[in-house]
Amino acid sequence: MGSQRRPAKVLEDATLISADVLERSADTSEFVRCTFIACDLQGTWCAGRTFAECIFRDCDLSLADLDRTALQDVTFERCKLVGARFDHCHTFLLSIAFAQCILDLASFHGLKLKGTRFTGCRMRETDLSDADLSNAFFAECDLGAALFDGTVLEGADLRSAVNYSIDPTRNRLRKARFAAEGLSGLLDRTGIIIES
């Protein structure tokens, strides 16, 4: 007789704070409509778990291991996600949103994130290559040295984003919206000099 797999333990409608998150959820594999507040979730804690309709608020998930993690309708508010590898998540029903987060060095490489909202985020050196960000919204985001290569930005709104450098010949930008003062970020690789 082979070993039998234990059923997944599900935690629903809970609020978890830093002091008890690891203890209360050590053997939980699925979280539904849970709120995580000021939790330090660096390392391997998130790997292989499912989060559905959850909110992470003021949490530190820097270098979090997101291998096989399912994020379904998950919102991150004021979280630190430095180096987070979202490209290692399960892609089935992947739906995420970010508000006032630090996403420096994070990777969204190759993900389908149509309509994703990034609001007031710092995304320096974030890897957005080969991602489908059609109709995504980058409100007041700092995209300094973010990597755009083969990125689909059709219909995306970057009117209030700053510090981006996007090569129009290497990315799909049809109907993407940019502010006039941000046009230099589309032309900087061409050698064209823009003066005001």
Image (tube, helix red, strand yellow):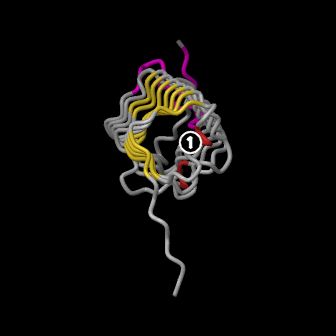
Looking at the image, can residue 37 be seen? yes
Q: Locate residue 88 relative to residue 9 in the image: left or right.
A: right
Secondary-structure class at tag 1: helix
For the point 37% across and 30% down, the residue is 157
Residue 136 image point, x, y percent:
38, 36
For the point 59% across and 34% down, the residue is 103
Where is mark 1, residue-wise?
Answer: 24
For the residue pair 186 and 194, the one nearer the viewer reads as: 186
For the point 38% across and 57% down, the residue is 92
For the residue pair 15 and 105, the one nearer the viewer reads as: 15
Residue neighbourhood size for the residue with mark 1, other residues' Cα within 10 Å, grouped as few (<14), some (14–19), many (≥20): few
Looking at the image, can residue 172 be seen? no
Instruction: Give the magenta-colored segment's residue range.
Output: 178-195
Q: Locate residue 134 relative to residue 67 in the image: left or right.
A: left
Furthest residue toward top: 196
Q: Locate residue 167 relative to residue 153 in the image: left or right.
A: right
Residue 140 image point, x, y percent:
48, 21
Residue 23 image point, x, y percent:
62, 42
Q: Locate residue 64 relative to residue 137 in the image: left or right.
A: right
Count how many numbered circles sit on residues in the image. 1
Is 64 a magenta residue? no
Q: State whether residue 106 is above or below residue 88.
A: above
Residue 156 image point, x, y percent:
37, 35
Q: Amino acid at mark 1?
A: Arg
For the point 53% across and 84% down, the residue is 2
